[in-house]
Amino acid sequence: MDLFLGSDEIATLLKDPEDNKRASSTGKVGLATYKDLRFLVVEDQEASRKTLKMCIQSMGGFSIDMAVSHGDAIFRIKNKMPDIIVCDYILGDGRTGQQLLEELRNGAALPDRVVFLMVTAERSYEQVVSAVELTPDDYVIKPFSPEVLGLRIDKAVQKKLAFSSYYSFKESNLLDQAVAELNDMLKRPAAKNYKYEILRCRAETLANAERTDDALQAYREIIAIHPFPWAKAGLARMLRRKDMLQDARIAIDDVIAVAPNYFEAYDLKATICSEMGDYSEAQKTLEHVAARTPRNWSRKRTLSTVALHNGDFEKAAAVMREVVENDVVGSSSVADCLSMARCALAGGDIDAAKIAMLAVSQATINEIEGPERVEYECVLAVLEGQNGGPERFERIRRMIADLEEIPVQTAVDIVRASLAFYDRQMADRITEKMMVGKQVRHAFQPLLGIYKMHGMEEPFRAIQKQAAKKRLKI
Amino acid sequence: MNEYDSVTPPDQGFVDVLASGVHDTKNTLFDALGRIESVKRHLEQEATPDSTAIALLNEASNAVERSANRLAKILSAYRLLRHENPVVLLPTPLSDLAEYVRLRASEGWQGSATLEVNPAPDAVWLMDRELIADCLVNALTNASRYAKQKVSLDFRPEADCLFITVTDDGDGFPASILHGQVPFSSVGLFIAEKLASQHEMNGRKGRLTLSNRHDDVTGAVFSLMLP
């Protein structure tokens, strides 16, 4: 059962025309409304929790749940969705309200219509307002009076009400209707105060609807008004989608220059650099941001892969070891075992590679399919050598025929296995496919590395030359 | 060369230590303020509240609050000088800002003059809402000390600029401030001037203008222009 109030329900709370009139003219939502809404206060300090509760009660709030930590908040939100979350920026144990917000939004665990208000001290204010993409609905700086908190919540609730139709379309995945609603909102005088929010939602919805050209245009129009970092980041994503990697890189560099604490921008830059074949810059970028976010294991996994493709085997292996030792939850995944094995193989340590592959359970092996299955079989075939490897490699040939598209990592694993079993034809065919395709820059360096390992740089260069001629003819 | 010529300004490390001390003291004062208010509430809830003690606590509370605010301003000035607090321009509805400033200014209102916040036009402006609100609350509070009857706050978008004006009906700014002989001697004015100039759009910077009224009454006019 959906426990939180839907837009219609919130709107119903404002059905009294006097309330509506008051809400639109003064910004006050009214005591009657807050009485029926569910609040969640997230704050690790008991005294502050009590103060916030008193403030909300003075606004007419009645149903007020309390969370004492980041984990407690996640549990309570999943158990019973609140309508309004009032969250302190500092949550103890090195956690912040911003991390909570990002975790909830990234995990689609927080519906758009739920208000998220950040409470911050003066010293954290800049970090709160400089958040680029996953921003709270509003914020309030300590110390504040109950009236100031009430005003900020009033404004946030009003904004949610103004966007309620848009949220409904978005939640139903009716993205074209969602865009149409936003276009209508731009014409409504009552929505004038939300102009930038509407433009932002519009660009993001166009991007989600795969209307890349429209989204690109939307972001450009916003940037012409003001170069908001979120708009620049959106532009970079759309340019990447259109394979305009050089322009995408310039755009994301601009974002990093003005928002150095926006870590996702570094991830995007590393992806763009990798796709451009500039693994050196990708590794440098990820090393920089990983040092500032030492417990982001997903980012470190990417760093390991990038370092491996960059030929920095030691770094790749060290980072993967750190991930496996520390990230207890995700460390037995096939992807992690494969990464560990590839690092060991690159360093010539066959035994370590075999140990890494043994960590994958039979049940997991039975579940994997598609490119990841091919990668697994290829790495295993190489490790088996002549004891079973050729037989496995025959099966791999059939699997490859079924693949519609071959990701770069899969191609690298196939080529490694092909060369190990003297199937030059297969290796060259896959390499040529990558060299004529749009992933050429992305695939170039790792494939060159494999050919070099077998003392076959010359044949690789010959394939590359032929492929370049083919591309030019196209 | 006399002995003063050889004195070098304090190094940045020393200034940072001072700023850190100011910051900690400010926080301690705000903490003390909270405790005074708790004791006051406790006394007020007693069957026969001790009015003398409550009055004394009110005085203590006001003194602590003034000191804490003063330190907060000094700290803001230090950060602005060191460019530690770059402004973050976010879309801010003017009606929202007007209401927010009115509410906050009312909380610390002094004197007998009334505060009049004229309706802001329906428009959204890019600004650092919190810093601009702090600056306006400070300007309004200052004006309330000198005004005879009324302090007003107006928002006027004009072409590509927004003018936010605080006007009072006191004696006006002294000539020494208006003629730049004592350029922005108050910390509040210094911050306002720096803050305005850090609001930059398409190469145009904001500015602070101080003037005196030329209509039928005297008074000071504090005007922020934001591009």
Image (cartoon, grey):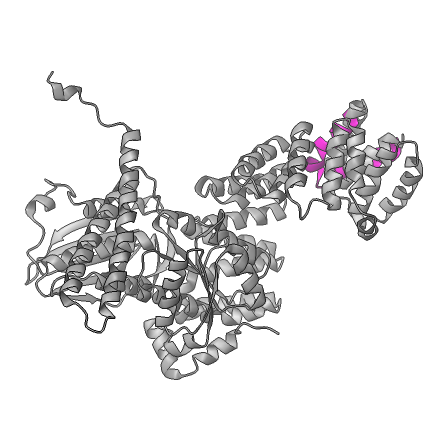
- Farthest-out residue, top: B1
Foreground of the two, B143 or A100:
A100
Say which residue appears at 65% left-offset and 30% top-offset.
A315
Q: The N terminus of chain A is located in which quarter?
A: bottom right
Say which residue appears at 53% left-offset and 59% top-offset.
A72
Q: Is residue A433 visible?
A: no
Q: Main secondary structure of the magenta part?
A: helix
Q: Position of residue A284 (x, y in %)?
A: 57, 32
Q: Position of residue B120 (x, y in %)?
A: 28, 65
Foreground of the two, B189 or A473:
B189
Whether the magenta-drawn stretch holds residue B178 is answered as no
Say which residue appears at 45% left-offset and 77% top-offset.
A36
Report the side of A139 relative to A145 (left or right).
right
Whether the magenta-drawn stretch holds residue A446 is answered as yes
Say which residue appears at 17% left-offset and 19% top-offset.
B6
Seen in the picture, residue A452 relative to A309 is either above or below; the reply is above
Q: The C terminus of chain A is located in which quarter?
A: top right
Report the side of A27 relative to A370 (left or right).
left
Report the side of B11 relative to A296 (left or right).
left
Q: Position of residue B185 (x, y in %)?
A: 15, 42
Q: Position of residue A387 (x, y in %)?
A: 93, 33
Seen in the picture, residue A87 relative to B76 is either above or below; the reply is below
Q: Is residue A64 visible?
A: yes
User: Start and end of the magenta stretch?
Assistant: A424-452
Seen in the picture, residue A264 relative to A63 is either above or below; the reply is above
Report the side of B106 relative to A38 (left or right).
left
Foreground of the two, A2 or B24:
B24
- Farthest-out residue, front: B47
